[in-house]
Image: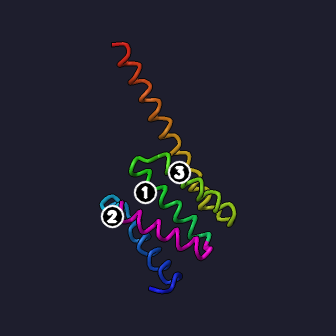
């Protein structure tokens, strides 16, 4: 397709269809690819709402994969754009997901520290 706007709509809709958790688990790599492309197109079109939604979706995909560090970065970007565009619902959702992903990082570090201590005492 030669239309950037047309591509954006088509790929954005694929991302929404792929947002179903069962589908996302089965095709996480493809879904991530579609959402990343949608983010590129939204950025090119200066469609801030599309960008924030794409960052949010990428954060969800990455945290489901266990990549909490990258997930927090995407949620943070979604939160900041949502603040700029005054989208309070998305801002709150991104804020909650950011906190949960960040807590998962800290929890993982905490558990690893405990395991190292246990292994060190044996």
Residue 117 located left or right of residue 102: left
Give the number of the mark in front: 2 or 1. 1
User: Element at badge 2?
Assistant: helix
Identify the residue shown where x is 43% and y is 47%: 67
Q: Residue at x 48, y 61 (%)?
A: 57
Quadrant where the C terminus sits is top left
Tag 2 residue: 23
* Circle number at residue 97: 3
Instruction: Name the dominant secondary structure of the magenta segment.
Output: helix
Image-quadrant location for residue 1: bottom left
Residue drawn at x 44%, y 79% as measured from the top left: 10
Helix, strand or loop for disc 1? helix
- Is residue 114 found inside the magenta-colored segment of the image? no
Mark sitting earlier along the chain (2/1) = 2
Look at the numbered disc 3 and give the secondary structure of its residue.
helix
Q: Earlier in the sequence, mark 1 or mark 3?
A: 1
Of labels 2 and 3, earlier in sequence is: 2
* Residue at mark 1 to residue at mark 3: CA–CA distance: 12 Å
Residue 43 is tagged as none
Residue at the limit of the structure toward the bottom, as seen here: 2
């Amino acid at each position: 397709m030669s239309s950037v706007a047309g591509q954006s709509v088509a790929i954005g809709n694929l991302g929404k269809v792929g947002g179903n958790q069962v589908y996302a688990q089965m095709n996480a790599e493809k879904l991530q690819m579609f959402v990343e492309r949608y983010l590129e197109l939204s950025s090119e079109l200066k469609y801030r709402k599309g960008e924030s939604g794409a960052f949010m979706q990428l954060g969800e995909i990455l945290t489901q994969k266990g990549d909490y560090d990258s997930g927090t970065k995407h949620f943070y970007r979604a939160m900041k754009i949502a603040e700029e565009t005054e989208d309070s619902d998305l801002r709150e959702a991104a804020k909650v997901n950011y906190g949960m992903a960040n807590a998962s990082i800290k929890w993982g570090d905490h558990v690893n520290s405990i395991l190292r201590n246990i292994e060190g005492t044996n």
